[in-house]
Amino acid sequence: MGRKGRGADGGGDPRADIRRWIAHRRNTELVLILLAVLICAAGHAAAGLALYDAVPTGLPAYAAGLGGAALAAHLAVRRFARHADPLILPVTVMLSGLGLILMDRLDHSYALRYGSEPVAANQATWTVIGIGLLVAVLVVLRHHRLLARYTYVGMAISLLLLMAPAFFGADMYGAKRWINLGPLSLQPGEFVKVMIVVFFASYLMANRDALALVGRRFLGLALPRGRNAGPVLLVWGVSLVVLFYERDLGTSLIFFGVFIVMLYIATERTSWVVLGGLMAVGGTVLVAATQPHVKGRVQAWLDPMAIYLPPEQRPPGLISDQSAQALFSFGTGGLTGTGLGQGHPDLIGFAGRSDFILSTVGEELGLAGVTAVIFLYVLLIERALRTALSVTDPFGKLLAAGLGTVIALQVFVVAGGVTGLIPLTGKALPFLAQGGSSTVANFLLVALLIRVSDSAGKASTEPEGNATILTPVIRVDDDPASPASPASPASPGTAPKEPRER
């Protein structure tokens, strides 16, 4: 029997049913969090036994720290977002715990081969800071629609942060995506990807009808009107600036891709997707032909083994064997892997802790481990899209769908680059790879997703007579307060709107 309407026919008290449903969701979340902590603790012990022939002395501190931080986040959800989806936080804890295991395991190999300093402790600190930010967001932001009040201020700040590394950033590893603030390095693009989704959700909610109007047809494709294509051209231009001056292919693809996906969700026009895809390919080809760093990554993608040819026979711009070493790692791992701590992921070099951390998973946990990690990301994306389907307001639908799209695109560009599906982008896997900016920004993303899912959960507990009928597709034109809604009568003298084509 469903959780709604049981009391309407004498089957019980509906309020009691709702309380039991809420308690069940939160208890399920707690059990899954404890399971994730136990799995991560077992993994940490296994890696220590392989590396040191003994259980790591820091295992109790690791388990207590991860468990305590996760429990604090759970209590915040139980208190301030009790209707939220019960799977979002456990999946995040699992990925973060696995990332800390890999950081500690890589510290050992990097110290032996390169004499580098350990980073696991710093990553644990950033994880705690990220969880603290998640709790703060849940406490302060009581409803996701409050974000719409700061749409254009947030957009202005986002554009400034996005373009700042091009003029003030530090050139590291061939890309300019960092800004140095004393001893700290900040990646503004990690925070911009969250802020930009908020702006897109608000902008598209307000302008979806104008963006859906049909202009001219070209080769059977219904193109948008010229003045409505302005936002797409602006976003495309900013993406080119990022790609050209910062040589940051990953951020540019995520930034532009999120906008096109959200635009399609808002308007249901496939022409936007086709137009956006052509613009993305055109911009990438242009920059790849003019920027040596990007061109080198394309060459490594086309022929990763060419790095082992004599220097005079190598394609121009090919200077790294990372792509080849990653393929060797996946081949060595096979189906079940060599075991945690028993591979050689340090052969990849400095990038083994960032985007190439997936090759460590492939070598030491095998295809089974890679599949499990990808499945965790897919589960997180699925919960975001389920939230978008369930929440009743248009802004929340676009916000949840956009946040899920950010995760999907980032995982795709990183996993695709490491496995050789697409050229390398240099982005970090969410929660799994090293990076303070990435970790904190992704916890901010999860906090917003939890907040929206809380609103979706509240809507699903409304009485049948007041509940909003949910459709099986993400629609953003059903808001009764919207001027374009059928529930809102047109003002006298208003001219009929042009038809939309989907």
Image (cartoon, rainbow, N blue to C red):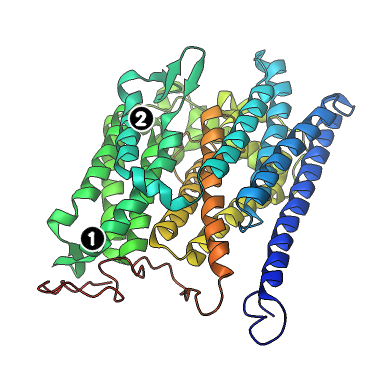
Q: How many numbered marks have been drawn onto this rendered protein structure?
A: 2
Q: CA distance from mark 1 to mark 2?
A: 27 Å
In the image, what residue type sits under mark 1? Leu
Q: Is residue 303 above or below residue 1?
A: above
Judging from the image, what secondary structure is the residue with disc 1 in? helix
Disc 1 crowd, CA 10 A, few/some/many (<14, 14-19, 20+): many
Q: Which mark is residue 429?
A: none
Sequence order check: which comes first, mark 1 or mark 2? 2
In the image, what residue type sits under mark 2? Leu
Please name the residue shown 29% across and 31% down the image: 244
Q: Is residue 82 above or below residue 147?
A: below
In this rendering, position of residue 448 left or right of residue 431: left
Q: Is residue 442 above or below residue 19?
A: above
Please name the residue shown 47% across and 76% down the image: 469
Disc 2 crowd, CA 10 A, few/some/many (<14, 14-19, 20+): some
Position in image of residue 107 (x %, y %): 70, 23
Q: Quadrant of residue 315?
A: top left
Residue 228 visible in the snapshot = yes
User: As rendered, which of 41 and 85 lies closer to the eye?
Assistant: 85
1 and 2 marks in contact (CB < 8 Å): no
Please name the residue shown 55% across and 46% down the image: 446
User: As rendered, which of 149 and 298 lies closer to the eye?
Assistant: 149
Q: Which residue bears the numbered disc 2?
A: 161
User: As rendered, which of 306 and 194 lies closer to the eye?
Assistant: 194
Position in image of residue 368 (x %, y %): 71, 51
Q: Is residue 282 above or below residue 352?
A: below
Tell me the quarter of the image containing the C terminus: bottom left
Tell me the quarter of the image containing the N terminus: bottom right
Judging from the image, what secondary structure is the residue with disc 2 in? helix
Q: Which residue bears the numbered disc 1?
A: 211
User: As rendered, which of 40 and 32 lies closer to the eye?
Assistant: 32
Position in image of residue 372 (x %, y %): 68, 51
